[in-house]
Amino acid sequence: MNLLAESNLPFTIALAVMGLLFLLQIIGIGDFDFDADVEIDGDMDLDAATGSAGVLGAITTLLGLGRVPLFVWLMVFLLLFALLGLSIQALASDLTGSPLYNLLAAVFAGGAALPVTSVLVRPLSRLLPQDETSAVGLDSLVGRRAKITTGRAAAGSPARARVRDRHGHAHYVMVEPHEAGSEMHEGNDLLLVRREGQTFFGVSLSERKLAPVQ
């Protein structure tokens, strides 16, 4: 199989990009552990923000983006895209005597690689070293859903809450209501909308009619 053939060009480029990213990561030139989560600014309109976060969150969950660092997800996707694309072209050549138009083959390969990547990264996330995925900044927890585990949260009186980061690891933070007149009790689900120092501020999911934390 000629990787430099025009019909295989998208897949050869994908392999080259994958190799380049891997090399840069190994030698430490680039940091490609991108954050795929959606953060919500406390000054934004909460209804619009939570709606956007819900849609984007559903998409990223479906694709498996929150399971592993984006660098790992991208490497798996590029590898699958290239292998599936080359296989499609080889099959087309065997059946018809000529490969498909490269952009058409790329669409087929990309459409097949997305769900396969989503399936593969789920077990892969459990195999990654703990210290590779557990370090996150506190600001990355803003926009995520949490649950009150201990105490009653009121203005000036925070309660302890559990929140999971983009890798699924649990963190325990102190939370007060975003709205001064609100209270949140043990077992309540909430959305973290802003942070001041070590204290987070949240909005009850029941007030916003959002799905509870799983």
Image (cartoon, helix red, strand yellow):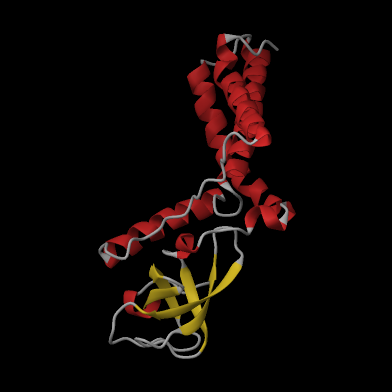
Q: Quadrant of the N terminus?
A: top right
> Which picture quadrant has residue 176?
bottom left
Rendered position, 185 above or below 9? below
Say which residue appears at 55% left-offset and 63% top-offset: 165
- Say left or right for 172 vs 91: left
Rendered position, 10 above or below 187? above
Give x and y (percent) for residue 79. Answer: 65, 32
**Observer-nearest of 14 and 175:** 175
Give x and y (percent) for residue 124. Answer: 70, 50
Give x and y (percent) for residue 200. Answer: 42, 73
Say which residue appears at 28% left-offset and 84% top-offset: 180
Number of residue marks: 0
> Which picture quadrant has residue 48?
bottom left
Give x and y (percent) for residue 113. Answer: 59, 36
Say which residue appears at 63% left-offset and 59% top-offset: 134
Q: Quadrant of the C terminus?
A: bottom right
**Observer-nearest of 122 and 96:** 122
- Say left or right for 205 vs 78: left
**Observer-nearest of 115 and 133:** 133
